[in-house]
Image (cartoon, helix red, strand yellow):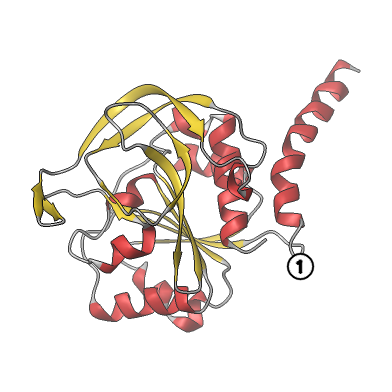
Amino acid sequence: MKKMATLLFVCLLALPVFSVCREGKEKKAPHVLFITGGHEYDENTFNQLLAKLPITYGHVKHPDAHAALKAERIAPYDVILLYDMPKEISEEAQGDFIAALENGKGLVALHHAFCSYDFWPEYVSIIGGRYHHYPWKENGVEKPPSTYKHGVTFDVKVVDKDHPITKGIEDFSITDETYGGAQLLPTVRPLLSTDEPTNLPLVCWTNQYRDARIATLTLGHDHLAWENPSFIKILSQAICWAAGL
């Protein structure tokens, strides 16, 4: 009896996450193109996280990832989930990337995907900001490289409780890697903020790029974040929102 009660409790906890994806017209789990490469991570443990998400997905790694953005290959997917950190992207791949977004594919940039493509300015416009590995300029003023710090425990505040990504989320604490001194466009819609001095003021926001829904979540370095219930729910709801569900 105790075992059945525990199972029922777990199932009830899962319902709010799955219900977000069930409110859309198609009433299906979003099909996600999961892209990695350019940054190491614990694949086995991260796969356990993916199994908790209300999605189906295909996985592709760099250097083969850009080819997956071709129109005929990206067509079956609803959302691109970036967990990669490539340095370079060809003009052809840039065109394929932008075309996918113009055709309505959603995009979720997760953690170190915020640090990609130092030499592709359009990427800033797409995800609403960027971590810079080199000195950079903002409004003509030169800025030093961005910073990072591992294993920081900090508080996260819900700025916008009405957005589908933050639905049912209360303020929470998390242990994660922080990103400081990075670029953030003033036009993004803030969802989650922090007062942690080694981090940007925001850890999650949305951005409109042409016809695509873009969500950036800078949390998610390792299992300490991946096992956080608030992180799991936010990521789930971000993917569903990006898919238009």
Say which quarter of the image contains residue 137. Answer: bottom left
Q: Which residue is denoted by mark 1 in the rendering? A: 25
Q: Nearer the viewer, residue 139 or 92?
A: 139
Q: Nearer the viewer, residue 105 or 193?
A: 193
Q: Is residue 62 visible?
A: yes
Left or right placement of residue 11 versus residue 163 in this view = right
Q: Residue at x 58, y 68 (%)?
A: 78
User: Tag 1: Cα neighbours inside 10 Å, few (<14), some, or many (≥20)?
Assistant: few
> Which amino acid lies under the numbered mark 1 shown in the image of this protein?
Lys
Left or right placement of residue 140 versus residue 53 in this view = left
Q: Is residue 176 above or below residue 191?
A: above
- The quarter of the image holding the N terminus is top right
Say which quarter of the image contains residue 5. Answer: top right
Q: Is residue 135 visible?
A: no
Q: Nearer the viewer, residue 162 or 130?
A: 162
Number of marks in the rendered image: 1
Q: Is residue 132 above or below residue 214?
A: above
From the top left corner, tell me how far across and down residue 14 is, in percent: 73, 38
From the top left corner, tell me how far across and down residue 106 is, in percent: 52, 65
Say which quarter of the image contains residue 23. Answer: bottom right
From the top left corner, tell me how far across and down residue 219 is, in percent: 42, 38
Q: Residue at x 55, y 42 (%)?
A: 160
- The quarter of the image holding the C terminus is bottom right
Q: Going by the picture, which residue comes out furthest to the top?
A: 2
Q: Going by the picture, which residue comes out furthest to the right?
A: 1
Q: Is residue 243 above or below residue 92?
A: above
From the top left corner, tell me how far across and down residue 204 is, in percent: 45, 44
Q: Residue at x 23, y 66 (%)?
A: 121
Q: Secondary structure at mark 1?
A: loop
Q: Residue at x 59, y 47 (%)?
A: 165
